[in-house]
Amino acid sequence: MGSSQSKTPAAEAAMAEKLMERIRALDIEEADTREPEKDFVYVGEDEPPRYMPRSTTVSIRTAEQWERELMKDPKNQLALSALTSNDPKNVLSQRSTKVADTQNFNIKISLEGSPVTNQRSSGRCWIFAATNVFRVAIMRRYNLKEFELSQAYVYYWDKLEKANYFLEQILETTGEDLDSRVVQRLLEGPVGDGGQWDMAANVVEKYGLVPQILYPDSSNAMSSGTMNSLVTTKLRENALELRRLSRKSQSSRSSIGGVKDKMMREIHLMLTLMLGPPPNPSKEFTWEYYDKDDKFFSLKTTPLKFAAELSSKVSVQANSGADVSSFFSLVNDPRNSYGQHLSVSRLGNVIGLRPVRYVNVDIDTIKKAAIAMLRSEMPVFFGCDVGKFSNSASGIMDTGLIDYELGFNIHLGLTKAQRLMAGESLMTHAMVLTAVHVIDGKPVRWRVQNSWGEGVGTKGFFVMSDKWMDEFVYQAVVDPRFVSSETRDILKQEPRMLPVWDPMGALA
């Protein structure tokens, strides 16, 4: 073995931090001596920039010249040392931001729900976020200290329903060319793990809910890649067969129903063998539990009745008047006019139940509704682009967390609307708000319950700055009591249908 030990990650991080401190010092010195730059707008006596022909190729000579000029700057030499040996996100993290983003909040729900959940190697965040909202209502109803709903139960029925939804969409689009954008989008992800609040609500309405102890995660629920790949391959094969039959004779078209039933039976077989047979929605199960006063109870009910109890008079009273089945989605999509009812074409899971629907509002409306819900002791499901300016280890989401301008001397200036238009950002993750810190009537930071286990953030909880919310939060699911009647009535409008490839069709 070598005579010297390799540096530890902590030592490397400390060295990188020292390098960045030197870069910051050089940046300050340079700023004091730098001449103001012209922004190349012809005003008054200023000369317009010299005309240069557009180059259509990459010139090796020019690249060499750029490199010579780049390395003349001591700041860039230090940046090279730091950035070639470390993840830029870690090197350029701002310590002052980490210190400011504390887990202290002056508005916090008393029952956040425990234990902290873990979706593991799957894309089920929306199911975890939704069931984490549902479980708080159930914990209050049954006076529980700890409780977890079966995410796998919702997952199983969602997979089966998505397979059926996909095949129906394929049959509805047989008039489109196979290489059309809509058909290719459908084929891209027939039964992905992602979803939306309305899709969770559909599964709960049709199949109900069960405690996690009665239907725990299988191996394929915790690590879904292989299962998804197999089911997707089979469904793509099915899609091509259905399109072929739809173009043949009348007798062939009349057999499509039977063929599709056989296809669904095969998908059911695959899901059942990989996830395990789920409880029957209409058959009784027995749930034995201790409440937070250590009293033993035994409840006999069905999954459908267990879910319906969320809207019972007793449950609504226990949850300060909140009926979670009435919650709906507000979104902030600055590309589209506010005050609009939006929906997404060919996006859903359960045929015949609610489509994915949004009320598009400004971000302040979302914040006010979220704060009102937290004041009333209810958690808030929300959708965001979690990978931007965030660190999962520290559990911080803050636009000031990473100073890319310092390290690269560039400006990242896209607006929220432009990110959506350019494909730079979209909803990638769903989590739950459980607290907010408000100063002089304005939110400063938010407490976030994630579903990545206790090993990230502060025992599974993150801190989100309010500025980060402005830029990267797109959705919040709210109690209709906490928005104006005008906002509620937007759902009565005929929705503006966005195409299935629209960013608002992204499944968290």
Image (cartoon, helix red, strand yellow):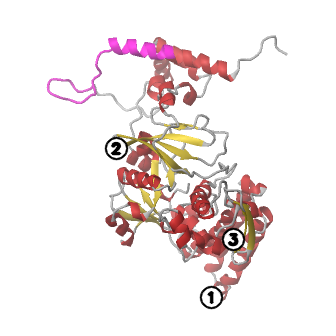
Is residue 217 left or right of 61 when viewed as pictured?
right
User: For residue 342, which quarter of the picture?
Assistant: bottom left
- Quarter of the rendering containing residue 202: bottom right
Mark 1 surroundings within 10 Å by alpha-carbon count, few (fewer than 14), some (14 through 19), many (20 or more): few
Residue 203, image x, y percentages: 61, 69
| Magenta stretch encompasses residue 406 | no
Q: Position of residue 313 (x, y in %)?
A: 53, 72
Residue named by callout 2:
441
**Do the residues bearing badges 2 and 1 touch, measured as CB atoms within 8 Å?**
no
| Residue drawn 38% across the image and 36% down it | 413
Please state which of the two labelled residues, at mark 3 or mark 2, is closer to the viewer: 2
The residue under label 1 is which amino acid type?
Gln
Between discs 3 and 2, the one toward the N terminus:
3
* Residue at 34%, 63% in the rendered image: 484
Q: Residue furthest left?
A: 44
Q: In the displayed structure, does residue 50 sit left or right of residue 439?
A: left
Mark 2 vs mark 1: which is more N-terminal?
1
Label located before the other in sequence (1 or 3): 3
Q: Which residue is mark 1?
A: 250
**Residue 376 in the figure: left or right of residue 235:** left
Name the residue type under label 3: Asn
Tag 1's secondary structure? helix
Q: Is residue 399 above or below residue 236?
A: above
Q: Which mark is residue 238?
A: 3
Instruction: Give the amino acid at mark 2.
Output: Gly
Q: Which quadrant is home to the C terminus?
A: bottom right
Cα separation, mark 2 vs mark 1, equals: 67 Å
- State the residue in front, 28 or 115: 115
Residue interval drawn in magenta: 21-49
Q: CA distance from mark 3 to mark 2?
A: 56 Å
Q: Quadrant of the N terminus?
A: top right
